[in-house]
């Protein structure tokens, strides 16, 4: 894929791909954490007792998302990345994350 | 008048759902339309720069609204929703979760609607943040670069669908068992 944009200063697409892939990883992480919680394999501790375990699960997923984004951004920000494959992976992660956070799916595990 | 028209919990719920969530939903709808309608194929000019700048700040504001809605939902209104009634209490009105679980016909509002609402909005907030970042970093290229525009549009569309879905679930829950 060519550099992003058609202006005088091409900007590598790496930073955008890092942001999109990190969002996919974050979504997928949340789905996996929720499934692990529902199957009793792992329960993230509640960070705010009145709200319960959801605070631990979502904070952990947000931490994974942030760390993955920071690492990917650092590695890709000045590089050209194969956009189609990375975006497909991002959509896969987002799709998995959405599906795994839906209660009817929990009964399958 | 000796009773409050709206309790603090009720006001927070309205602020969470209508001001923050509703604002984010409107922002997402406008962003989705703008990403398509303002897309340009040539060398960006002053008009495209201005449009991209406005669109970027719209997406940034939308992501901020979404995060504010997610955080108030998780840390302010959800604890009020899941409050446990004392043993033997007859009126479950102040305890929405217990109220909707007390009848078979409404139990799904917790087991499906509220359980989904606990997590799905966090995914939407991550997606909106990613697109907002791309808008800030690439500015005009968000409208001028076709692949980048397409990817941003897909993510905003997913985000819009997710927020619409959880907003509808929130309306249904609040209709049966409002946080008061």
Image (spheres, rainbow, N blue to C red):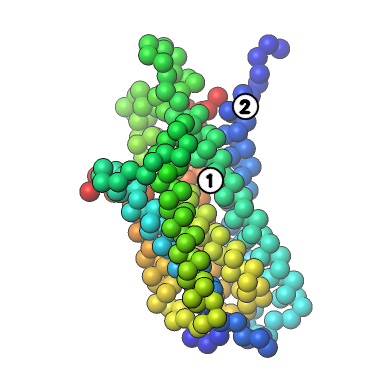
**Who is closer to the viewer here, B137 or B151?**
B137
* Residue at the (46%, 48%) spot, across then down: A59
For the residues labelled 2 and 1, say whether their Cβ atoms are less than 8 Å apart: no
**Image-based side of B55 in relation to A73, left or right:** right
- Quadrant where the N terminus of chain B sits is top right
Determine crowd level at label 1: few under 14, some 14-19, many 20+ residues with C-alpha closer than 10 A.
many
Q: Earlier in the sequence, mark 2 or mark 1?
A: 2
**Image-based side of A93 in relation to B61, left or right:** left
**Who is closer to the viewer here, A19 or B99?**
A19
Say yes or no: labels 2 and 1 on the same chain.
yes
Task: In the rendered structure, find residue A75 and report the number of the disc placed on it.
Answer: none
| Residue position for label 1 | B70
**Who is closer to the viewer here, B125 or B92?**
B125
* Residue at the (44%, 29%) spot, across then down: B82
**Who is closer to the viewer here, B124 or A26?**
A26
* Residue at the (55%, 24%) spot, across then down: B180
Q: Quadrant of residue B17?
A: top right
Please, what secondary structure does the residue beneath circle 2 have?
helix
Residue A26, given in percent of the width and then of the height, sits at 43, 59
Determine crowd level at label 2: few under 14, some 14-19, many 20+ residues with C-alpha closer than 10 A.
few
The residues bearing labels 2 and 1 have C-alpha atoms spaced at a distance of 18 Å
Does residue B10 sit above or below B16 in this rendering? above
**Image-based side of A47 in relation to B76, left or right:** left
Residue B163, given in percent of the width and then of the height, sits at 51, 50
Q: Chain of mark 1?
A: B
Q: Is residue B151 visible?
A: no
Residue A45, given in percent of the width and then of the height, sits at 39, 41
Please, what secondary structure does the residue beneath circle 1 have?
helix
* Residue at the (59%, 66%) spot, across then down: B133
Task: In the rendered structure, find residue B8 and report the number of the disc placed on it.
Answer: 2
Q: Chain of mark 2?
A: B
């Amino acid at each position: 894929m060519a550099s992003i944009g058609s202006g005088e200063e091409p900007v590598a697409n790496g930073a955008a791909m890092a942001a999109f892939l990190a969002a996919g990883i974050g979504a997928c992480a949340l789905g996996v954490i929720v499934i692990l919680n529902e199957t009793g394999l792992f329960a993230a501790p509640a960070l705010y007792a009145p709200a319960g375990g959801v605070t631990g699960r979502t904070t952990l997923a947000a931490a994974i998302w942030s760390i993955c984004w920071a690492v990917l951004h650092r590695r890709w920000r000045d590089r050209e990345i194969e956009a189609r494959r990375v975006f497909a992976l991002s959509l896969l992660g987002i799709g998995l994350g959405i599906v795994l956070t839906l209660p009817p799916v929990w009964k399958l595990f | 008048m000796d009773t409050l028209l709206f309790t603090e919990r009720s006001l927070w719920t309205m602020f969470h759902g209508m001001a923050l969530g509703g604002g984010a939903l409107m922002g997402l709808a406008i962003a989705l339309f703008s990403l398509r309608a303002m897309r340009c194929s040539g060398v960006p000019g002053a008009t495209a720069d201005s449009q991209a700048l406005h669109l970027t700040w719209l997406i940034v504001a939308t992501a901020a609204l979404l995060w504010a809605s997610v955080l108030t939902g998780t840390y302010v209104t959800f604890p009020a929703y899941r409050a446990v009634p004392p043993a033997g209490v007859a009126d479950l009105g102040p305890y929405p979760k217990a109220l909707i679980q007390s009848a078979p016909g409404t139990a799904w509002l917790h087991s499906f609607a509220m359980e989904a609402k606990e997590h799905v909005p966090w995914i939407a907030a991550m997606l909106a943040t990613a697109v907002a970042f791309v808008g800030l970093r690439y500015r005009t290229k968000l409208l001028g670069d076709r692949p980048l525009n397409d990817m941003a549009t897909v993510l905003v569309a997913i985000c819009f669908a997710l927020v619409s879905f959880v907003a509808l679930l929130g309306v249904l829950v609040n209709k049966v068992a409002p946080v008061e």
